[in-house]
Image (spheres, rainbow, N blue to C red):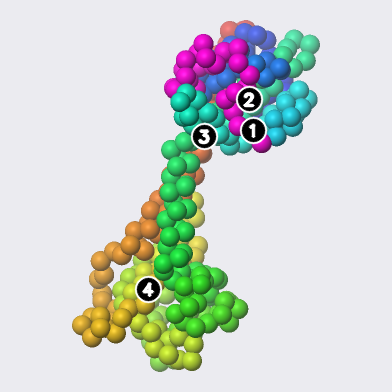
Amino acid sequence: MGMFGWVRGRRSARTERAIIAALSRSQSVVELGLDGVVRSVNERFLAALGLRAEAVVGQPHSQFFMVDDAEHLWRALNRGEQVAGTYRAKGASGREAWFQAVYIPLAGRRGRISSVLLYACDISDERAAIVTREHHVDTVDHTQGVVEFSLDGMILDANDVFLGFTGYRLDEIVGKHHSVFVDEQESRSDAYIGFWRRLRSGLHDAGLYRRLAKGHVVVWVQATYNPVFDANGRPVKIVKYATVTSAEVLDAAPAKPSVAPPSIATSSAAVANVLDLIDSASLRAGALAMDAAIDAALAEQRSALQ
């Protein structure tokens, strides 16, 4: 059975209780009347908001959940439509939690909607991680040159910092190959060809690089080239983070050391990639847990009726 496939069917009160019990073992669960008043809650929901049951049961849904269009939500539920999304909830002493949730209308014996079951994954930690990641990205975008490449080295995008130290406008470089930043001899070298081969295979590269800005002006940059991966672990593009290096540093530093210590840019990119994976994996795991709980509850009910 697909996820939520049982929603529109007619279920007995016993089935509803079995479903609620199964879901309560792994998810936050709230049972609501069609008037929006809370009928029951489980311990997971109370713990997420730091509340006691007596402070929640009998109170309106709107006291706890921040819904942009509550009128639209309840019209849909009264029509028997399920509604899913990400919602912010408020609890004791200004406490907040974020839930990936679904509202499910439950039908009585005659097919009329009798109540609404809300169950949810607490994604507060994942939400906080996203905010932190966005802050890091915003900081990097204002302090370092950032440029994105396709796996074959074509320029996809660049930020203002990068454009500033290369002297180009964005429309002058998008769609062109990275080789516009190196001289012709280097672009044909085995080292340069191997450089892009390694990046395409998912390997990171970091060091001090000699590059050509607009007008063939030589600039030296401390940079990292970071492959970005899809959900299956396949590289899909390359993101470069770079800062211009002063002439004084160049006098004492070799160009493109074979091994470079990780820079702040490297760490930021790595953290962002990890957080992406955590975010996606957490939501997928939560959805699978919900589906498994529902199927288990229905299986128990079928066995009891045989």
Residue farthest toward the left in the current orientation of the protein: 252
For marks 3 and 2 on the same chain, the one whose residue lies earlier in the sequence: 2
Where is residue 128 shown, x and y percent of the image?
45, 42
Where is residue 167 shown, x and y percent of the image?
49, 83
Pointer 2 with pointer 1, Cβ within 8 A: yes
Q: Secondary structure at mark 1?
A: loop
The structure residue drawn at horizontal position 79% and vertical position 11%, both measured from the top left corner, is 110
In the visual, does 213 lie left or right of 104? left
Position of residue 284 relative to residue 6, above or below, is: below
In the visual, does 164 lie left or right of 242? right
Rate crowding at label 1 as few (under 14), some (14 to 19) or many (20 or more) other CA atoms within 10 Å.
some
Q: Amino acid type of disc 1?
A: Val
Q: Secondary structure at mark 2?
A: helix
In the visual, does 207 lie left or right of 50? left
For marks 3 and 1 on the same chain, the one whose residue lies earlier in the sequence: 1
Position of residue 198 relative to residue 123, above or below, is: below
Pointer 3 with pointer 1, Cβ within 8 A: no
Would you name the residue on which mark 4 appears?
243
The part of the chain drawn in magenta is: 40-68
For marks 2 and 1 on the same chain, the one whose residue lies earlier in the sequence: 2
Q: Amino acid type of disc 4?
A: Thr
Residue 255: image quadrant is bottom left
Is 63 contained in the magenta span? yes
User: Which numbered dot is residue 67?
Assistant: 1
User: Which numbered dot is residue 62?
Assistant: 2
Q: CA distance from mark 3 to mark 1?
A: 12 Å
Eye-nearest disc, 2 or 4: 2
Q: CA distance from mark 2 to mark 4?
A: 49 Å
Residue 39 in view (yes/no): yes
Q: CA distance from mark 4 to mark 1?
A: 43 Å
The structure residue drawn at horizontal position 43% and vertical position 38%, both measured from the top left corner, is 125
